[in-house]
Image: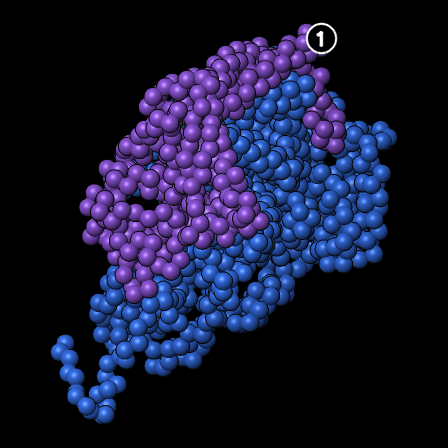
Chain colours: A blue, B purple
Amino acid sequence: MKRYAYINDDGPSQDLYRDNRISNTKYTVLNFLPKNLWEQFSRFMNQYFLLIACLQLWPLITPVNPASTWANEREVWVVENGIKKLIQAQDIRVGNIVWLRENDEVPCDLVLMGTSDAQGLCCVETSALDGETDLKTRVVPPVCMGMDPVLLQKIKGVIECPSPDRDIRRFDGNLRLFPPFIDNDVCPLTIKNTLLQSCYLRNTEWACGVAIYTGNETKLGMSRGVPEPKLTAVDAMIDKLTGAIFIFQVVVVMVLGVAGNVWKDTEARKQWYVKYPDEGPWYELLVIPLRFELLCSIMIPISIKVSLDLVKSLYAKFIDWDEKMIDRETVTPAHATNTAISEDLGQVEYILTDKTGTLTENKMIFRRCCISGVIYGNESGDALKDTELLSAIETGSPDVIRFLTIMAIGNTVIPVKSKNGAILYKAQSPDEDALVQAAAKLQMIFVDRSANILEIWFNGRTIHYKVLETLEFTSDRKRMSVVVKENDTEKIFLLTKGADEAILPCAYAGQQTRTFTEAVEQYSQLGLRTLCFAWRELMPDEYHEWSLVFKEANSTLVDREWRIAEACQRIEHDFEILGVSAIEDHLQDGVPETIETLRKAGINFWMLTGDKQNTAVQIALSCNFISPEPKGQLLMIDGKTEDEVCRSLERVLLTMRITTSEPKDVAFVIDGWALEIALKHYKKAFTDLAILSRTAICCRVTPSQKAQLVQILKSCDYRTLAIGDGGNDVRMIQQADIGVGISGREGLQAARAADYSIGKFRFLTRLILVHGRYSYNRTAFLSQYSFYKSLLLCFIQIFFSFVSGVSGTSLFNSVSLMAYNVFYTSIPVLVSVLDKDLSEETVMQHPQILFYCQAGRLLNPTTFAGWFGRSLFHAVVVFMISLNAYTYEKSEMEELSMVALSGCIWLQAFVVTMETNSFTILQHVAIWGNLVAFYALNFAFSAVPSSGMYTIMFRLCGQPSYWFTIFLTVAAGMGPIFALKYFRYTYRPSKLNVLQQAERMGGPILSLGTIESHPGTIEREVSPLSISQSKSRSPVYEPLLLDSPNTRRSFGAGGTFEFFQSQMRLSSLYSRNCKDN
Amino acid sequence: MAERGGTSSAGGPAAAPGIDAREPTKKPKYSRFSQQELPAFKPILTPGWVITAFVTIGVVFVPIGVGSLFASQQVVEILDRYDLDCVPSSFSENPVNYIQDSNTNKTCTRSLVVPKQMKAPVYVYYQLTNFYQNHRRYVKSRADAQLRSKSSEGETTTCAPEAVTGDNQPIVPCGLIAWSLFNDTYKFSVDNKAIDVNKKDISWKSDREHKFGSDVYPKNFQSGSLIGGGKLNESVPLSEQEDLIVWMRTAALPTFRKLYGRIEVDLEANQRITVLIENNYNTYNFEGKKSLVLSTATWIGGKNDFLGAAYLTIGGLSLFLAICFILVYLVKPRPLGDPSYLSWNKSPADQTDG
């Protein structure tokens, strides 16, 4: 641009250009920020941190979002103003009608309006949303059913929907179409009528729907929310130590700053050659302290962050790669979703485990049943083979047929005909699957569900039922019902199945429920899952009246769930109880051994389950969770009112306190109701109890209670690990320090939410004892070593400042300082990720050694003080030796600096060597290769004429005194440490050392250990109960006690078996409850 | 594991094949690295090992120590502190005035006796104490680029406060280090016969060739009101100003020696050497000592007993430790990996004192 200078013009042109002020200060007020930032960020470290910070600020890439950016440009068919056109997915507005074809991805949350299917059904795959791969059916709301596609384009109406939330299982909306389409009737909408973002349309030619939530307000978008970052105990400790070092640094800086200023005022003024000005700027006093601050800033190693991130991701990779944690059955490898918390695995103190699907396989098999007082399947252990039952079916006993009907159709199972004619069942709950399959084997075959017509074959007859309503299962109601109309007889039935306490109290007046109660009792003693079956015939009037109420409840927006429950209550009464079914769930392979090993490792187990108390206790016994009498003792906390709970809580607490001194396994059992009261009113007492007890069984707990329990343990500063497999464990898993999900049959929900996912419960041993323990050990070493090496250099700098007039001169040049942290010292220590102090086998045999990790023995202020002392000692050694060896005519800055630096590097190599327990080839390469690389790098620097170090390294390496100095440094620095370590190792060995010695010399312990961990021994210890001894070896759950109540009583009469006494008390209490209701 | 009741109509569990199909190839590839199973050498500290190590250190270090001490003892060194004696008695109360006054007579004569024969070359050093060449302000006050080439003559920013003259002309060589150049001179004679001091090649060859330019001539040097140390001949390029080059290799410690020159004749025992000192340099301000050092050298360098003594100490201590360990091992043998130290069955509290 041309410049015009207007001569002698006082006009406005004067202001056109800047005035003639010259700025020669480095910063002006205006450019300080940008210029300084520019300078700061020319440093690599800062760039790294900036990069990381930016990445974390960028919401698009932090949490993994399946519907990421590319989805925005995708083109979809949308109806706008009655015309179908292709637009970009990001331009979809709420209210648009979106058309999808088969295998299309749903671009936003839609309410289904029409499909190619005549019955208004369509299938979606929701795996991107909840990880479940089975197809789910979605249905068009009744008002739009059967509407012509052309008509659909012109449809007008309004959909009332709640504000966006993250609940992917719930949607309570209303649809009202405007005339002329349909009348003004309000049509309720549920999640069944929606297509959610990122699902795929399958097996359906086309579907269309109205956009209700778009963009980040979709269910998926809302649930993406950033979970609370988890900080490991190790990280917290490192933070604490960093804080301590920072305080130390500030003190050092202040002391040196004051000393520097004093020296300057007294001595430096006399040193004429330094030419201190008489009058300095006002901030003169600050200059020296700030210089020292910069000099000491290496005290806190920035590299630690980078190194830790690196090794942590490697720990996670080791978990992913581990061949021994692959579930052979389903070929599911273990996976670490959270790469940052592996060390915590080694410090777990409490494991909170779900029961179903976690300890058990969640493979349900129908085993026994009790129909109208007759118990089937007791002799053979399998009701399907019980001839009595078979003959009862043959003869057509009405109760039995009724029972089988509920088994077959009282559910939400979808039968799918496979190509070869066999019928496959798609069930959302494994219990229903088991029931339907069992019914099929008992001649009641559920064949087809088309729309709301159910078809079953019974003894060659085809029966059709029409489903009028489905009263779905919720964890509050604990039962589900269907209202069906038998097509032949036009009779309406209410068929219900559910938990005993939800069904039995609703029996019609006069029915004897005692036999059922006893059956339930008996089955749960065997560890079987029970369901009660009941039915009632509805009069058409009653049904119609009720269906209006139900419909209204279904279409409310506020508290819909509660309103529905209330409506259900109105019809679910006066049942005729038909019977009880008992379903068996296998224990997973190796569960007892896993629990035994981990308990030996000092980990406390809590079982949180939605199951019944007796079932839970039995399962707990069978998997070594609790020990039977006299070694173990079970304490019950129960009660229905505040007072009762309080009293029982206090009693248990007292017993706990007394027995803590005895070597006894005391466990408490609490049910959901008492827990609710305890958590609400006696949180303090309950927390005390939680601290005291190593084992607890909580039954009938809800997902939020599970999370609360985790919270309580966390608040007592325990490291908690929650393990579960189902959607109801997700909250607990997210709440715990470490969440482990089992990728099991209940979908992948838990595994997705978890930090680690494993295929089977037994892999937990390896995850904790091998991966957790090694990770902790390695991080403990790596972090302390990082501080050690930074402190070492920093101490030398500080010492040097005492001989350089406390002026803040750096002994080392900037290249060395940078390379020291980035190359020389970080590479050897990185291979410590391969270090193993003990072999995996030894750890498995002596899980007690985990105690060292749990108690944080390898990384705590004491060990850190050791490393601090070591760095001080080494700094003195390096400084004194190089200073004295290079005195007088040899005392040249650059040379001395390199001598000291080489001394440090050599010491580092030996320190790492000494702290390494097992040397693989990689360790050798890294440690000794690094030393070689140090010289190579410095030779390279020394070959550049313009560098300050020019020729220095060549000169030094030619001098014998250099090498003598180095060897002297190594010997003086390592000798005492080596001697001390040897002395401790041999004469004051820790358990760790003893095991190391035993392992590597094949000493006596190893053989002893083998005997100790022999499975037979465990069983002998654990199960004095003669019956259980032979059975508990088998992974399949088998009854511990004989079936008849008499046997049980004889045990109870046996005297001190308190556990069973309390069970008796429980059963009496239970029947009382039933009466109360 | 119990057989899942599989019969006619109902197929297998719906979920299991689903999982199978989902991740068929997610199985990780086996490698010894990924399984953390690389073959490893796992040493343990057995007494044999440790004692051998210490004995070896002792055996190696003691001879080296003896050798170094011997070499150091071979060095003949004459050290003569002259800063106080070279101040006339009339100024002894106020040596600073003496040294700063340009009119006083600065020459001073010292005589040294050679204690033992000194083989050529005999190195002549000057030694300063309490002189902080490593002071941050001082160390930084130089401009390497300016010393190297004429074209960078103006690059004096790093040289403050000795960067430019009063009228903004760049000083060559600039900076406090050059400004404070040591300028005492020594002349040696034996029996009134002058001994030549060779001042060639006293600096590092690499410095002469690469750090100090042959086309850079001193300019505006010591022209200010405050004169620091020595002056430079403006017609000699910096690469040949060896005293300056030596001086500019800053010392790391406040006590240091710098090479003044070499005497290339042998000095016989009991010879009396007369040194004529031009005592110009001001160390009186800060009570720094000035000494003249004549010294021979061996393979280990100048006289320095430290390495030898340290090697002997470390070697001796190692042997001592080795003997201690052997004694303890014999008196109180202790099997490694003794099971009695593993008492898992005790309560965790007992485990803490491991």
At a point 44% along the width and 49% down the height, the residue shown is B104
**Residue B317 x/y as whole percent:** 60, 17
In x, y percent, where is residue A466?
47, 57
Which residue sits furthest left? Answer: A2
Q: Which residue is mark 1?
A: B331
| Secondary structure of the residue carrying numbered label 1 | helix
Residue A201 is situated, as x and y percent measured from the top left of the image, at: 32, 55
Q: Is A796 rendered above or below residue A1001?
A: below
- Whether B38 is drawn above or below A356: the answer is above
Give the position of the C terminus of chain A as an image quadrant: bottom right
User: Quick check: A660 above or below B296?
Assistant: below
Name the residue located 43 percent from the left edge and 46 percent from the top edge: B105
Q: Residue A768: image x %, image y %?
A: 56, 34
Left or right for B63, reference A419: right
Q: Amino acid at mark 1?
A: Val
Q: Nearer the viewer, residue A548 or A193?
A: A193
What chain does badge 1 belong to?
A: B
Can you see residue A248? yes
- Give the quarter of the figure containing the N terminus of chain A: bottom left
**Residue B282 left/right relative to A1069:** left
Residue ranking furthest to the front: B192
Q: Nearer the viewer, residue A484 or A147?
A: A147
Please rate how many residues cluster around mark 1, counting C-alpha atoms within 10 Å: few if below 14, some from 14 to 19, many from 20. Answer: few
Camera-side residue: A451 or A127? A127
